Amino acid sequence: MFYLSIPFIFECGYRSVLPRVDIPRLCFWDVWGNNVLFGRLSAFIGEWCWMLQISLALQTICEGLAQSLPAHKGLSVTSKFAFSLPFVCLLAEILGTAGPVTKNNWWCICEAVTWTYMFAVASSAALYMFRLIDANEDLKVVNKDARTFCMCLFIIGLGYCPYMLALNIPMYVKRYYEDEDDPNISYLSFAEGLPDISYCHSDDRSWSEWSADAAWMIPYFGPAVWTSIWMTKAPRIETSADAKPLKLSTGENDMEMND
């Protein structure tokens, strides 16, 4: 989990200092490194590692609960959904790369929908497992870290999904139709687009150019990076002869229940 956090931390740090808006090739600073190619490459790797962290944390809690509560068959389905998240994220990253390369916002819409789906799945799984832990007094006592993780992930999804549906996806839909109505718009092939994203086309630091994208950039490059750092100590399974009968713990904050 620690090593998975490194790419996402680097990406958020890099993109917070050298932000850009992909489709118009707009950069905050006209300097080397502030271009869509580097930004997209760092996002591809960093975001995938971040989603893999979330997936592994959910699977670990789910597997532990399945051993403690074997009667709950829904945990098997929950684990499969959690396992699928990195693969769905890989699709999202491919879509997120196709948009900037081709200058077609349609791919950005598809990427945003995919991210909404991932967080809907992750937050639903987290809520389900939180309720299982909360309903069992033994599990509730020794699994405070797992319980907190599940509740926080659910709250994040509760805010993220409505934001995506109400603001982010409509923003890209609006841009797509504006491009479609523009007779001068010219989409690019991948062969044309790859060289085109390798340098800054224009730099502008006026709020009017950045206000629409700032709504997702600020929480992404700020609070989101701390979730990756937090997951380096994500809940994991620990068995002990003195535990009842299974304990989910976090790093050094182990709590044991004696018989």
Image: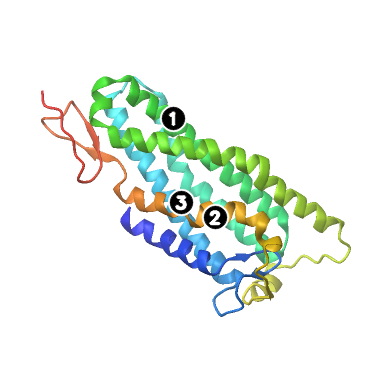
- Residue farthest toward the front in the current orientation of the protein: 207
Quarter of the image holding residue 147?
A: top left
Q: Residues within 10 Å of mark 2 (few under 14, many from 20)?
A: few
Residue located 23% across and 23% down the image? 138
Q: Residues within 10 Å of mark 3 (few under 14, many from 20)?
A: few
Amino acid tagged 2: Ile
Residue 16 in the figure: left or right of residue 140: right
Residue located 83% across and 56% down the image? 180
Residue 161 in the figure: left or right of residue 13: right
Q: Secondary structure at mark 1?
A: helix
Residue 116 picture location, percent across and down: 58, 42
The residue singled out by tag 2 in the image is: 218
Residue 202 picture location, percent across and down: 69, 74
Q: Secondary structure at mark 3?
A: helix
The residue singled out by tag 3 in the image is: 223
Residue 167 picture location, percent across and down: 67, 44
Label 2 or label 1, whichever lies nearer to me, is 2
Q: Secondary structure at mark 2?
A: helix
Which label belongs to residue 53? none
- Residue farthest toward the right in the current orientation of the protein: 183
Q: Earlier in the sequence, mark 3 or mark 1?
A: 1
Amino acid tagged 1: Leu
Q: Residues within 10 Å of mark 1 (few under 14, many from 20)?
A: some
Amino acid tagged 3: Pro
Q: Earlier in the sequence, mark 3 or mark 2?
A: 2
Label 3 or label 1, whichever lies nearer to me, is 3
Q: Earlier in the sequence, mark 2 or mark 1?
A: 1
Q: How far, Cα to Cα, is label 3 from label 1?
A: 21 Å
Q: How far, Cα to Cα, is label 3 from label 2?
A: 8 Å
Q: Is disc 3 in contact with disc 1, using a CB cutoff of under 8 Å?
A: no
Q: How far, Cα to Cα, is label 2 from label 1?
A: 26 Å
The residue singled out by tag 1 in the image is: 127
